[in-house]
Image (cartoon, grey):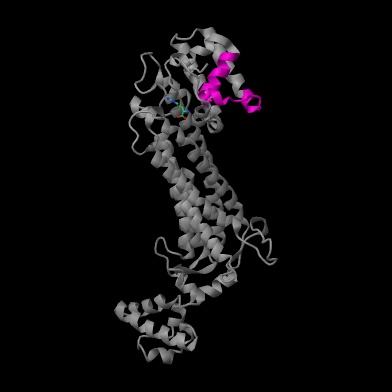
Amino acid sequence: MKLWGGRFEKDTDSLVEDFHSSISFDRRLYKFDIMGSIAHAGMLGRIGILSAEETEKIIGGLECILADIQAGRVEFEVGAEDIHMNVEKLLTERIGDAGKKLHTGRSRNDQVALDFRLFLREEIDNTKDLLTALLETLLDLSSEHLKTWMPGYTHLQKAQPITLSHHLMAYVQMFLRDLGRLGDTRKRLNLSPLGSGALAGTTFALRREEVAAELNFDGVTLNSLDGVSDRDFALEFLAAASIMMMHLSRLCEELIIWSSGEFSFVSIDDAYATGSSIMPQKKNPDVAELVRGKTGRVYGDLITLLTVMKGLPLAYNKDMQEDKECVFDAVDTIQKSLLVIRPMLATMKVNADIMAREAKKGFTNATDLADYLAKKNVPFREAHAIVGRLVLECSRRGCSLEDLTLEELKTVSEFFEEDLYEAISLQTCVQKRSVTGGPAPETVQTAIQFSKETLDQL
Ligand code: ARG
């Protein structure tokens, strides 16, 4: 007989049994379900709904069930529908009638909302740890490569010279924001919905705040309908996860480009690359490609839940059981991605001489030559045109701006002097860009320091 079977005259059709059961995936919540039940039972004991003996039996029974599940000694039943009823059924089988009192003043609707928040809170913390480790690796690499010159790009065309440090520090800013978003999500998530009941609270004088404090929540939800039907916390997590995957994907895309033969800026360590079943020479950046690919999956998880929630009337609807698999999938995907990217970055070889060589090509100092004239009071627009003509001439000759002689340069502008060569050297182009947020090594060093302090506070 079902735990809710009283008003039914027929058994559930076996197709329905299988269709609506969620134990195959929500078993993952067992630890949180039991934690929540222990806190609920303790409170029921304190307000006199359970006797001391019943409370002890229930809590002891739940602790044994937890240990047995962890040891793989429990077989869940599809017929018992979900993790909540599986645990309750096991409890009653083991301790007898006292088990039947556990659900007093509670509904599976507030129970599942509680379990899901507890689960996600822990996984947000785990994700934050992994993201922090990645940030630390990026900060270490940035400190190492303050003077590793490289071309900066716009439109994937060489634009202006920067350093690898500066480039990586761009990702540090993105990931710091991601870490902040996860922290914000956690703050809003951290209220206990228990006591919302099925939808309209309860007539029992539950001490919601006490249970919340015991479960390390910052407080309780303020509306019982919202308490059972809000999944914003999961959506916020999925949105933060999607944005973070987008950042990881962009980083991976760059590693894929940089490790191509055409670029050869970096070589990915053999441990993080794979070969081809037919082409013996191949070494492919599969890990980076997979992270890029899995980004689509996490976006899908976000869209899944947004779509499930759209148009649901208050309060709980069974549709909401579909909230779990997408969140589990996103948690697993982002954590595995974070885990593998960190050592891949830490072990990749940076080909600094190739990067520096490429940084000089493609007239990356053209802006600096125009700036040189502008500093001598030539209107910037005119300076731009003058240098544009010089670039055209150099492209015809197949040389660089610094290869032009002073006499040649003087024919287009009398303001050119010997010091222009120094002004457009690769080192100067980077080192003089010391405006806050710029690529000059000391400026980036300051940014690294500042970012480390930000990281410590997140
Ligand atoms: N397995 C359900 C879920 O995940 C638990 C809540 C069920 N509530 C109900 N009224 N059927 O959403």
Residue 395 in the image: x percent, y percent? 46, 85
Numbered circles on residues, count: 0
Q: Quick check: is 68 in the magenta stretch? A: yes
Residue in front for this viewpoint, 51 or 164: 51
The range drawn in magenta is 67-93
Q: Quick check: is 4 in the magenta stretch? A: no
Residue 386 in the image: x percent, y percent? 35, 84
Residue 367 in the image: x percent, y percent? 40, 75
Q: Quadrant of ligand 1?
A: top left
Instruction: Please give the name of the residue rendered at 33% of the width and 32% of the height, measured from the top-left corner.
Output: 313
**Farthest-out residue, right:** 280
Instruction: Please give the name of the residue rendered at 35% of the width and 80% of the height, measured from the top-left corner.
Output: 373
Instruction: Please give the name of the residue rendered at 52% of the width and 42% of the height, measured from the top-left corner.
Output: 329
Residue 371 in the image: x percent, y percent? 37, 76
Quick check: 236 left or right of 65? left
Instruction: Please give the name of the residue rendered at 33% of the width and 37% of the height, measured from the top-left corner.
Output: 311
Quick check: 115 left or right of 416? right
